[in-house]
Structure formats: C-alpha cells, structure tokens
C-alpha cells in the first residue's frame, strides 16, 4: 500500500518509523512518505493560513498550497488515491472503515490545523478522487496528525503479513461486533487473584464457550449499543444475552 501524508508538522509523524509500522515500511508492505505542506507555498513567509471569510476567531488553511499538494501527489492516477481528511465533522472512525481503507492501494492524508482546511479543497478533490472526512470522536484536537497516527495503526495491522499471527485479528474487539473477553497470562495466581479455572483446564470447548459468554457479557455491560446492533444471525442458541 502507498501512503502519503501532508502536514505542516511532518515531525509529528515520526512515530511511523517505530514498531510494526516501521517494520512494514522497512519490508515494503507500506510505502509511506510524509510531506511538508509548506513545500507548495511560494511566498517568503511560506504562508498556509488566512482569516476566515465571514469573520470569527482563528485562521483557515488556504486552498492554494493544498491544491498544489494534491495535484502533485495524485497526478491523474488510475485509480486515484483515497483522500482521507481527519475532521471532527467527519464520519466516525470504526473497524469497518479501517477495513475499507486497508483495501485501497493508495491513501492520501491531509492534516488540517487551525480552524481546518478551506472547504473548496475537499469539494474540488471530490471531483477526481474518493474523499472521506473521518472523525476520531466527539472532541476537538489541535490538528489531524494524531488522528492519522491512529487511523494508520488500525489500517496497517489489517494488511496481509503485518501481524506475526494473523489469528490475532479473528476474535479481537470489534471483529464481529463484540468486545473481546478478558485475557490472562502467567502466573496463575497473582496478588491473591486467580486466573479463571476454565482457562487452565485445557478443555478447548469450555474455553471457547467461556470466552464467548465473557465477550457477550462485557459488551452488554460496557457497550449495549454494540449488542443492540449485533446481527442476530451471528448468535448461537447457547449464547447468553445479559
Ligand atoms: N474548527 C473545526 C471544527 O470546529 O470542526 C476544528 C478544527 S481543529 C482545531 C484542527 C484540525 O484538527 C482539524 O482540521 C482536524 O484535522 C483535526 N481534528 C480535530 N479534532 C478531530 C477529531 N475529533 N477527529 C479527527 N480530526 C480532528
């Protein structure tokens, strides 16, 4: 997968050299480049923002450098990249959207700052490429860089070969609309707390049943919205609905 990220703070994306994303870059699974938006400015101050039309506080990112950046990074490409713009006004980021983005051959991220990017940049881009504004949640960050780190973590771990054990993706939270059951490792007793007996039994049938029930219970208690949205066809008759 090819990934381009445009930001006025390229240093913010330095963690993309680390851990499994760094490894995916090193082995070519991810061809990732971070670009400084100011590369596409032409004045001595390398200006990227200006006051908002209509008045009000703050500054808005000017369209010209963004237009040139997108022209340069998506030059009449077939298929065009999928432009992802982090924004608190966007669609909520979910595992389903991570899967959709993981299937794209080329992602292009535009990191907003200040009061955001002039709307015409997105409207113009939408005439030649898919554009998705994505929100991490109902709160406001300083800029889109942290959102890109989050989105890329979720997307990269879905790419074939990135996780050492692809089975990790099978039963984890949000894979099938449920939260994952609690996990334990050695020692069997720690500070007077025991690992549930069933997990030490070696009985794979009982363990699978326990994990399924624990996942359903945890989801019911913490995220009843997920349980309510669950496809009933995915339940079996032994499922305990709390
Ligand atoms: N004026 C904007 C509004 O009220 O919707 C907020 C702009 S915010 C200060 C600056 C940038 O941070 C946004 O352009 C976006 O890139 C990023 N950002 C802020 N909150 C975000 C969120 N919840 N999800 C994704 N990106 C966010």
Image: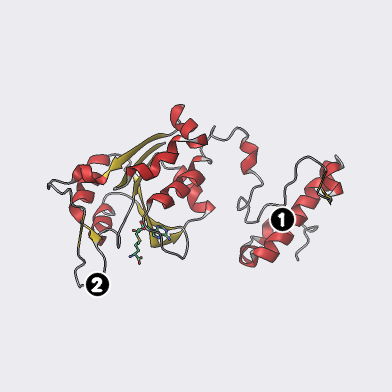
Asked if residue 210 lies left or right of residue 38, the reply is right
The residue drawn where x is 81% and y is 49% is 191
Label 1 or label 2, whichever lies nearer to me, is 2
Residue 187, quarter of the rendered image: top right
The Cα–Cα distance between marks 1 and 2, rounded to whole angstroms, is 48 Å
Whether residue 71 appears in this view of the structure is no
Quadrant of the frame with the C terminus = bottom right
Disc 1 C-beta below 8 A from ligand 1: no
Q: Residues within 10 Å of mark 2 (few under 14, many from 20)?
A: few
Q: Which residue is mark 1?
A: 215
Residue 232, quarter of the rendered image: bottom right
Q: Of helix, strand and loop, which one carries label 2?
A: loop
The residue drawn where x is 80% and y is 52% is 210
The residue drawn where x is 51% and y is 35% is 19
Rendered location of residue 239, percent (x, y): 77, 58
Quadrant of the frame with the N terminus = top left
Q: Nearer the viewer, residue 184 or 231?
A: 184
Rendered location of residue 118, percent (x, y): 24, 60
Of marks 1 and 2, which one's residue comes earlier in the chain? 2
Residue 133, quarter of the rendered image: bottom left
The residue drawn where x is 30% and y is 60% is 116
Q: Residues within 10 Å of mark 1 (few under 14, many from 20)?
A: many
The dot on residue 56 is 2
């Amino acid at each position: 997968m090819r990934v381009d990220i445009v930001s006025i703070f390229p240093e913010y994306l330095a963690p993309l050299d680390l851990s499994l994303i760094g490894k995916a870059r090193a082995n070519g699974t991810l061809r990732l480049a971070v670009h400084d938006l100011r590369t596409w400015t032409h004045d001595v101050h390398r200006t990227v923002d200006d006051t908002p039309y209509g008045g009000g506080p703050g500054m808005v990112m000017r369209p010209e450098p963004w237009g040139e950046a997108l022209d340069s990074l998506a030059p009449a490409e077939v298929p065009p990249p999928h432009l992802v713009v982090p924004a608190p006004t966007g669609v909520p980021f979910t595992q389903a959207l991570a899967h959709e983005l993981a299937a794209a051959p080329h992602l292009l991220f535009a990191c907003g700052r200040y009061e955001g990017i002039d709307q015409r940049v997105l409207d113009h881009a939408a005439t030649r490429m898919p554009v998705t504004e994505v929100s991490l949640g109902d709160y406001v960050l300083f800029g889109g860089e942290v959102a890109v780190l989050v989105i890329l973590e979720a997307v990269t771990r879905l790419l074939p070969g990135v996780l050492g054990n692809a089975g990790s993706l099978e039963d984890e939270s949000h894979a099938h609309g449920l939260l994952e059951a609690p996990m334990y490792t050695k020692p069997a007793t720690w500070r007077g707390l025991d690992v549930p007996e069933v997990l030490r039994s070696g009985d794979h049938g009982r363990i699978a049943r326990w994990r399924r029930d624990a996942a359903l219970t945890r989801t019911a208690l913490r995220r009843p919205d997920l349980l309510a949205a669950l496809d009933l066809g995915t339940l079996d008759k032994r499922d305990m609905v709390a």
